[in-house]
Image: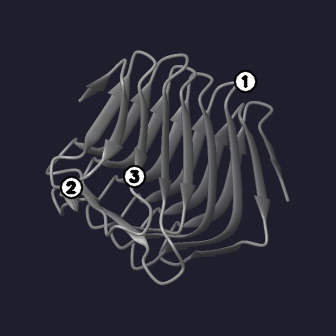
């Protein structure tokens, strides 16, 4: 856990994930391989919370940052809450459990994600999920894939603002959805 400090990730793998809060500023070393995992059921690979807290993870076209969850389910790849900020580039997010969220954003948090792939293979996968009037998600050059799962949702917004540019959404399986909006949500692109 990173609590109110500036920190550069120097390990190549964080099997139990990372958490930043209380104005922590966390980033990764350029061009260093990086793998993040939630480590089990109801776990999170990357969590940010609190005003002034930010995590910036940048991979490259040839060396993407990998994020995964275990088959146990009900886990988050990336979760931003309480006015925190996530900036993500060249990510490969693979969710292996049922009821998993690739990128969840709520309570006024802001996420900017680009050049990344979000994939889920079990039921009730959520690609981009956002909630709250002050919550914002910007995605560009994304591939969001919900496959082989009953009830998957590629993009879901409750009152939040989501902007997608040059992105591809694919949702396969019974009762699956591409884009769902509720409560005056805004999804543009």
* Residue located 67% across and 30% down the image: 135
Identify the mark nearer the N-term, 2 or 1.
Answer: 2
**Residue of label 3:** 28
* Residue located 35% across and 73% down the image: 121
Counting other residues with Cα less than 10 Å from the Cα at mark 2, is it few (<14), some (14-19), or many (20 or more)? few
Q: Quadrant location of residue 159? A: top right
* Residue located 27% across and 67% down the image: 96
Query: Dividing the image into 4 quarters, which one contains the C terminus?
Result: bottom right
* Viewer-proximal residue among 83 and 188: 83
Q: Quadrant location of residue 5? A: top left
Residue 182, percent from left and from top: 71, 38
> Could you tell me how far apart the alpha carbons at marks 2 and 1 are, in whole angstroms?
36 Å
**Residue of label 2:** 11
**Residue of label 1:** 133
Pair 3/1: label in front: 3
* Viewer-proximal residue among 39 and 60: 60
Marker disc for residue 4: none
């Amino acid at each position: 856990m990173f609590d109110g400090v500036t920190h550069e990730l120097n390990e190549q793998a964080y099997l139990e994930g990372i958490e930043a809060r209380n104005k922590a500023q966390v980033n990764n070393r350029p061009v260093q391989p990086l793998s993040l995992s939630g480590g089990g059921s109801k776990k999170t690979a990357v969590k940010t919370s609190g005003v002034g807290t930010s995590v910036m993870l940048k991979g490259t076209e040839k060396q993407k940052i990998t994020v995964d969850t275990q088959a146990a389910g009900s886990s988050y790849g990336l979760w931003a809450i309480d006015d925190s900020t996530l900036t993500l580039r060249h990510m490969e997010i693979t969710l292996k459990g049922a009821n998993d969220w690739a990128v969840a954003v709520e309570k006024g948090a802001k996420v900017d994600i680009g050049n990344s792939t979000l994939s889920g293979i079990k039921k009730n996968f959520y690609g981009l999920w956002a909630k709250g009037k002050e919550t914002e998600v910007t995605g560009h050059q994304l591939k969001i894939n919900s496959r082989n799962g009953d009830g998957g949702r590629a993009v879901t917004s409750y009152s939040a603002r989501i902007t997608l540019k040059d992105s591809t959404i694919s949702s396969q399986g019974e009762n699956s959805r591409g884009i769902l909006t509720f409560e005056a949500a805004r999804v543009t692109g």
